[in-house]
Image (spheres, rainbow, N blue to C red):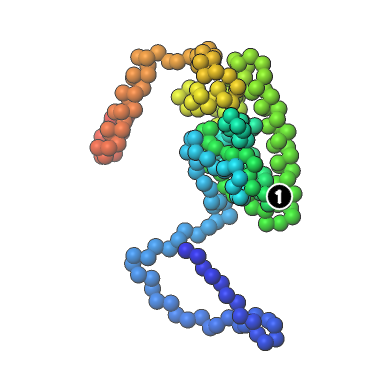
Amino acid sequence: MKLDLHTSLHPSGGAAPAPAPRAISPAPRHFKAAPRRTENDEWQLDVARGRALLEPGQHATLWRIRSGAFLVERPTRDGPDVVALALPGDLVGLEALLGEPCTFGVSALLAGSARPESLGSDAGLARALGDAVRQQQRQALEMSQLRSGPVLERLQHLLHMLSRERGGVPIERKALPTLKAIARLVNSAPETVCRELNRLLPARPRAEQRRERATNTAWQLIGAAALPPGLLAQAA
């Protein structure tokens, strides 16, 4: 809901005095008040894996990554080329600082979220510029580690970066991006990536995987049946 606020002026140039308050009738029962925005309540956009946050040529605002991992890519004749991996805390859409359209596209390597970065003051602009400079220096080093050396070492760097996104918790094999996406990022073939990942993250025995799936299915059925608390605790 958008509210338009109008201010009339006195002949003297000052604002007209506010009208006397009037009684407001109680809201109907079906009316639901909008939640109040608090200082820590920030609007954010959730982006599913593989979906775009920014497109090349788009006029957009500056975004700060809140969660997940995002590919920053430049368009080429042969398709998008990865130039950086943006992680929580990073800014994307830096062209907005100059009022220019996006040069790079930004898409989610892992599902994540981002929020518009406020530049309401000179201090906010200076902070964003400083963050952008430091981040680009870091990303240049990270991309050199992801694009040079043995593929096994490149994947180790990538796994370390993705675990950092998760607060230091190692990422599981099933939570990784697709082999094709990883291969583009580390500049290798999907077959090579698959072979080296098997060395770094060996697959669990099939019997263990089947037990885990059976357990998950059982808990889903229990939840769907909405068992009473006593029976639910007994089942646990």
Q: Residue at x 45, y 15 (%)?
A: 203
Instruction: Estimate how packed mark 1 is, as few (under 14), some (14 to 19) or many (20 or more) residues with alpha carbons within 10 Å.
Output: few
Q: Is residue 44 visible?
A: yes
In-front residue for pair 51/215: 51
Where 211 sits versus 32, above or below?
A: above
Q: Quadrant of residue 65?
A: top right
Identify the secondary structure beneath mark 1. Answer: helix
| Left or right of 142 in this view: 192 | left
| Left or right of 114 in this view: 232 | left
In-front residue for pair 225/3: 3
Q: Is residue 91 visible?
A: no
Q: Residue at x 50, y 43 (%)?
A: 46
Number of labelled discs?
1
Q: Residue at x 61, y 83 (%)?
A: 17
Q: Quadrant of residue 204?
A: top left
In-front residue for pair 128/23: 128
- Quadrant in which the C terminus appears: top left
Where 227 sits versus 152, above or below?
A: below
Q: Residue furthest front?
A: 77
Residue 15 image position (x, y, % from top left): 65, 80
Residue 201 image position (x, y, % from top left): 51, 17
Residue 27 image position (x, y, % from top left): 38, 71
Where 172 sits versus 56, above or below?
A: above
Q: Which residue is mark 1?
A: 98
Q: Residue at x 29, y 28 (%)?
A: 218
Label 1 is placed on what type of residue?
Leu
Residue 232 image position (x, y, % from top left): 29, 34
